[in-house]
Amino acid sequence: MKIRHFSFLLMLIFAAASLASCGSGGGAPGSSSSDDTNILIQSVLLSVDSDDIDVFSNPTACPAGTGGKPESLLTDSTATVTITAAIPPTNPDNPDPAFVSPFPANIESCSVSYTSAVTGAPIIASTTIYPNCSFSDGSTSCTLDLLNIARKNQWWDDILSGENKPAGWPNPEVRYTVVYSCKYQNSFKKEGRLGGRIDIDLADFLVCGG
């Protein structure tokens, strides 16, 4: 199995028309205006330990006598999101005495979609997740659901049943782009949005333990 550790500085995903409706505040592309929440989203970073996602486990597949352990059972896959945020600059010569910090902010929900450019790739239905994630001034990291066991099993079953046959199968893995679109609330319940995307490869990777 190839192991790749990587992270992406994300281009956030909302259209220019949506941004225009949110005001003119600055921030990372795709985030909602700081005019609404008094939070400036400076960057969003997604990372995973490996973009190779195993969708089938066979504990008897690893050769005996090689010193390796049997392949582990499947687990839910997660991603890490790191949000860097700040309070927008104000006039230091005229501070607002009534200012209330917008932090901590809480991610209320994220819509997650999966798309693939590979012909015949199984469809992975969009879903909504509810992360336990609060972020503050500076950088904060949280865990997000990426692909759970049930979705891995369904993906593999769709191929084995013949319902789907990705181009080139069974040789290459099948690449998907996973897009997160998240809604958050600041400390006084004003809503904003942030999001991003990450690429993953799905296949029956043989993962013998060391």
Image (spheres, rainbow, N blue to C red):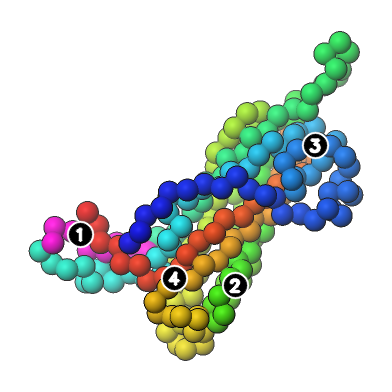
Q: Is mark 2 in CB contact (under 8 Å) with mark 1?
A: no
Q: Residues within 10 Å of mark 2 (few under 14, many from 20)?
A: few
CA gap between label 4 and label 2 equals 12 Å
Q: Is residue 155 visible?
A: yes
Badge 3 or badge 4: first in the primary sequence: 3
Q: Position of residue 130 (x, y in %)?
A: 62, 53
Upstream in sequence: badge 3 or badge 2: 3
Residue at the spot of label 1: 69
On residue 117, the disc is: 2
User: Is 124 part of what is drawn in magenta?
Assistant: no
- Is residue 56 placed above or below 87 in the rendered structure? below
Measuring from the top left, give residue 95's x and y in whole percent.
85, 15
Amino acid identity at mark 3: Gly
- Please state if 72 lies on the left or on the right of 64 as rendered: right
Where is residue 80? Give x, y as percent: 52, 46
Write down the region rendered in magenta: 66-74
Q: Which residue is mark 3?
A: 26
The main secondary structure of the magenta stretch is loop
**What residue is drawn where x is 13% and y is 61%?**
66
In front: 12, or 132?
12
Question: What residue sits 89% from the left and 42% below the top?
Answer: 23
| Distance between the alpha carbons at the discs numbered 1 and 4 | 24 Å
Residue under pointer 4: 173
